[in-house]
Amino acid sequence: MAKIGRKHLLKVTLFLLVFLLALPAWGETERVDGYFTLIDGEGRIIARTAHQVKKGDQYLTSDNILYRVEEVKEDTAHLRFVKRVNLEAAASLSFFSRIKKVITTLFWGEEYVQGKNRPIAIYHTHSDESYVP
């Protein structure tokens, strides 16, 4: 009887796992009745978005300026300048990453066909956000 119970429990567990994996993922909610206008402390329009905006949210502009939402009144979010983000510094290797790279190169001898300075292309778009509502 114990074996039948375990098999049944395993089947039910697997069914629930498959069922849960088939559910749609939760995403950010968007407005259907308009959009938010994000304004900095000097009254300049930084962005417009249909994404829900709340106090504490952060927004990084294409110029790498980080803002934080301080207040939301109706359709307007008031932003406060936080800092200018240095992406080169953020992308540089940490101390431990450098050690890992040296050890990996010594023991496994990774070498790319292009050499050390291989080009990398990155394509990124915000096609669903690139229109003015």
Image (spheres, rainbow, N blue to C red):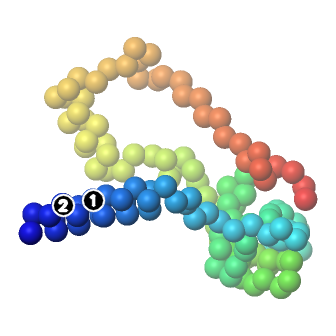
Against 108, residue 23 (above or below) is below
Residue 45 makes an appearance in the image: yes
Q: Position of residue 122 (x, y in %)?
A: 60, 34
Q: Quadrant of residue 127?
A: top right
**Total residue callouts:** 2
- Please name whichever residue, 120 or 64, is drawn nearer the observer in this view of the structure: 120
Q: Secondary structure at mark 2?
A: helix
- Please name whichever residue, 13 or 124, is drawn nearer the observer in this view of the structure: 13
Q: CA distance from mark 2 to mark 1?
A: 6 Å
Q: Residue furthest front?
A: 1
Q: Position of residue 130 (x, y in %)?
A: 82, 49
Q: Secondary structure at mark 1?
A: helix
Q: Residue furthest left?
A: 2
Q: Is residue 89 left or right of residue 17?
A: right
Label 1 packing within 10 angstroms: few (<14), some (14-19), many (20+): few
Against 104, residue 2 (above or below) is below
Circle 1 sits on which residue? Answer: 11
The residue that appears at 61% across and 63% down in the rendered structure is: 27
Residue 66 makes an appearance in the image: no
Q: Position of residue 90 (x, y in %)?
A: 50, 52
**Disc on res. 7:** 2
Image quadrant holding the C terminus, namely bottom right
The amino acid sitting under disc 2 is: Lys
The residue that appears at 24% across and 29% down in the rendered structure is: 105
Label 2 packing within 10 angstroms: few (<14), some (14-19), many (20+): few
Label pair 2/1, CB-CB below 8 angstroms: yes
The residue that appears at 79% across and 69% down in the rendered structure is: 31
